Image: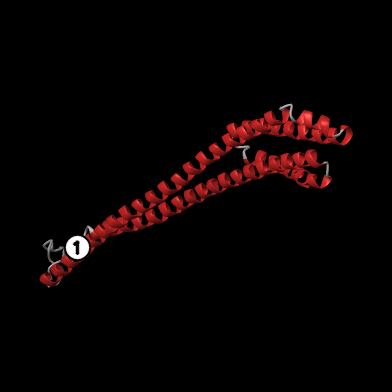
C-alpha cells in the first residue's frame, strides 16, 4: 500500500524546495524581446535603405535637370556668338550641347517614369526645348544663307525668347518638386531612425526589468533552498 508523503517532504524526509515558477516565463519573454529587437532593427534597416535610395533618386533627377538647363544655355550662347561674329568657332558649345540635351531628356524620362506630374512636366519641357532648338537652328541657317541682317531680325522676333522662357519656367517647377520630394524623404529617414532608437530603447528597458526580476527570483529561490535544507 502506497504511503502518501506530505506535499512539502521528499521520500527521505527532506523539505521540498519551492520552484521558481516565474523564471522560465520571464526568461522566455526576455528572449522574445531580444528576437523582437533583431527583427525590428532589420525592418528599419530595410526602410532606411529604401528612403536612402529615394533620396539618391531625387538628387539624380536634380542633377540631370541642371545639366539639361546648362546645355540649353550653351545652345543659346553658341548661337548668339555665331550671329554676332559669323565665325563657326562660336558654334562649338552649340554643337556639343545638342547630343547632351537629347541624352539628358532620355535620362529624365526614365527617372521620372514613376512620377506622373513630373513626367507630364517633362513632356512640356521637351516641347519647349525642341522649339528653342528649332529656332536656334533656323537663326544659324539664315545667318549662313542670308547674312546677319535676316538672322538678327529673326532673333529679335521674340520666338526664341518665348520658348526659352517656357524652358526656364518648367525647369523651375520641376526643381521645386524635386526639392520638396528630397526634403520629404530626408525627413522620413530621420523619423525612421528616431523610431528605431526609441523602439530599441523600449525593448532594452523591458529586458533589463525582466533580467532584474529573474535575478531576484533566482536569489530568493537560492535562499529558500538553503533554508529548506
Per the image, label 1 sits on a secondary structure element best described as helix
**Quick one: quadrant of the N terminus?**
bottom left
- Which one is in front, 25 or 131? 131
Quarter location, residue 171? top right
**Residue 86 location, x and y as percent?**
83, 41
- Which one is in front, 114 or 29? 114
Q: How many marks?
A: 1
Quarter location, residue 200? bottom left
> Residue at position x 48%, y 48% from top?
47
Identify the residue under disc 1.
Answer: 217
Q: Does the image show residue 13?
A: no
Q: Is residue 113 above or below residue 202?
A: above
**Relative side of 79 to 120, left or right:** right
Q: Is residue 141 above or below residue 188?
A: above
Q: Residue furthest right?
A: 145
- Which one is in front, 92 or 111? 92
> Residue at position x 56%, y 49% from top?
56
**Relative side of 21 to 183, left or right:** left
**Residue 205 location, x and y as percent?**
28, 56
> Residue at position x 61%, y 46% from top?
63
**Residue 52 location, x and y as percent?**
51, 50
- Which one is in front, 74 or 60? 74
Quarter location, residue 62? top right
Colour setup of the view? secondary structure
**Quick one: quadrant of the C terminus?**
bottom left
**Relative side of 24 to 156, left or right:** left
Q: Is residue 181 above or below residue 124?
A: below
**Residue 198 location, x and y as percent?**
34, 51
Amino acid at each position: 500500500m502506497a504511503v502518501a508523503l506530505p506535499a512539502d517532504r521528499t521520500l527521505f524526509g527532506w523539505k521540498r524546495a519551492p520552484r521558481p515558477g516565474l523564471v522560465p516565463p520571464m526568461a522566455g519573454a526576455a528572449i522574445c524581446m531580444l528576437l523582437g529587437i533583431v527583427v525590428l532593427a532589420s525592418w528599419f534597416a530595410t526602410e532606411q535603405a529604401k528612403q536612402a535610395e529615394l533620396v539618391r533618386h531625387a538628387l539624380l533627377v536634380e542633377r540631370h535637370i541642371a545639366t539639361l538647363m546648362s546645355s540649353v544655355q550653351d545652345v543659346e550662347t553658341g548661337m548668339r556668338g555665331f550671329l554676332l561674329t559669323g565665325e563657326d568657332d562660336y558654334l562649338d558649345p552649340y554643337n556639343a550641347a545638342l547630343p547632351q540635351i537629347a541624352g539628358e531628356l532620355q535620362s529624365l524620362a526614365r527617372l521620372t517614369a514613376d512620377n506622373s506630374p513630373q513626367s507630364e512636366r517633362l513632356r512640356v519641357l521637351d516641347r519647349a526645348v525642341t522649339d528653342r532648338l528649332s529656332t536656334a537652328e533656323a537663326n544659324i541657317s539664315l545667318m549662313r544663307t542670308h547674312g546677319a541682317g535676316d538672322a538678327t531680325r529673326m532673333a529679335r522676333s521674340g520666338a526664341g525668347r518665348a520658348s526659352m522662357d517656357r524652358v526656364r519656367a518648367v525647369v523651375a517647377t520641376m526643381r521645386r518638386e524635386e526639392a520638396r520630394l528630397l526634403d520629404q524623404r530626408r525627413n522620413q529617414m530621420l523619423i525612421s531612425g528616431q523610431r528605431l532608437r526609441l523602439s530599441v530603447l523600449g525593448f532594452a528597458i523591458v529586458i533589463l526589468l525582466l533580467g532584474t526580476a529573474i535575478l531576484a527570483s533566482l536569489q530568493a529561490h537560492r535562499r529558500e533552498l538553503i533554508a529548506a535544507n
